[in-house]
Image: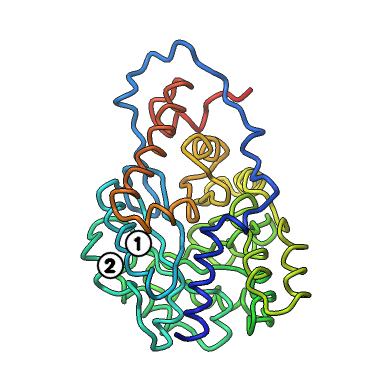
Amino acid sequence: MTDIEQRKRDHIEIVLSGAARHSASAGFEGISFEHNALPELSFDVIDLSTRFLGKTLKLPFLASSMTGGPADSDRINRAIAEAAEQCGFAMGVGSQRIALSGGKAHGLDRHLRDYAPTIPIYANLGAVQLVNGMGLDQARRAVEEIGADALILHLNPVQEVLQKDGDHDWRGVTKAIADLVPKLAVPVIVKEVGFGISVDVARRLHECGIAAIDVAGVGGTSWAAVEGRRAPDQPTHDLGELFRDWGIPTVEAVASLRARFPDLPLIASGGVRHGLDAAKAIRLGADLVGQAASLLAPAMQGTEAVIAHVEFFARALRLACFATGSKDLRALRKAPLR
């Protein structure tokens, strides 16, 4: 097993243990809808469908980028892909760096489309890799090898500094993104990994021509804490704990970006626990909501467990619509708050 493969295995074990969650909140508990005791709706016909980057989804849900060790990745990706196809949500894969460097694909190849022929699938590369040995050719390969509908570039500077042999030099990344976007045949989504995206960074990304932003804010898994747990030395472990709650809470990130960029497609992830949190995120301006860590345990169990998880998520979102008198997501975005 390579060092990168071992790191991915460590990541999934730490995330599943729950030891690396933010102690800070995503902020959803501070948002409350006004209850509608006379909704004049049928619960069963509320429409949860949406369009995102030109594709229709049955649910405004994204299985956010995740991965695992070599023994886990294939079954995780297959379970999520099959569930996404059946339930009609989007899927973002984990980093494809290993596969693009000549390693085993671990479920990130054309076979993924056999399990999910119609739903949107998003490829994934670290943005810093664009100035560290990977460029347009590798980005195109990442998309082509899984038949992806878009490419996610993830931003993780804090994680990289805490990671053994991580990328410390982020000079030129903005320009590299700007150079890549017009040359790629599919839209580019930029996401953080749990530290949030500020208005200033969103402005720079918007100027690069990116198609959407996933705010991936504070409230879910802390990748500072994950890398601190993996650290071979005490100072790095302590630094990971010190920066466990560093960043912008998800609610703050979504609200501020929507206020500044009214037409920019936004994904809310980071501490979205269930469909009620999703309803709040959509009300604040999110177009999709993403989950990663919450899906890991169901994905390890198999397709049916993922379907059950997502169906509960959808039922809670539908109930939030019903109890606010919202017949669809467009109406939910205007639902009164208390």
Quarter of the image with the C terminus in it: top right
Q: Secondary structure at mark 2?
A: helix
Residue at the image point whose x is 34% and y is 55% from the top = 301
Amino acid type at mark 1: Ile
The reply, left or right, for residue 270 in relation to residue 180 is right
Q: Position of residue 231 (x, y in %)?
A: 67, 75
Residue 18 falls in which quadrant of the image? Answer: bottom right
Closest to the observer: 5 or 171?
5
Q: Position of residue 129 (x, y in %)?
A: 54, 81
Model colouring: rainbow
Q: Which residue is mark 1?
A: 121
Q: Residues within 10 Å of mark 2 (few under 14, many from 20)?
A: many
Amino acid type at mark 2: Leu
The reply, left or right, for residue 34 in relation to residue 183 is right
Q: Are marks 1 and 2 in contact (CB under 8 Å)?
A: yes
- Residue 112 — which label? 2
**Eyeballing the image, is 71 above or below 51?**
below
Q: Position of residue 249 (x, y in %)?
A: 67, 49
Closest to the observer: 314 or 225?
225
Q: Which residue sits furthest top?
A: 38
Residue at the image point whose x is 48% and y is 62% from the top = 189
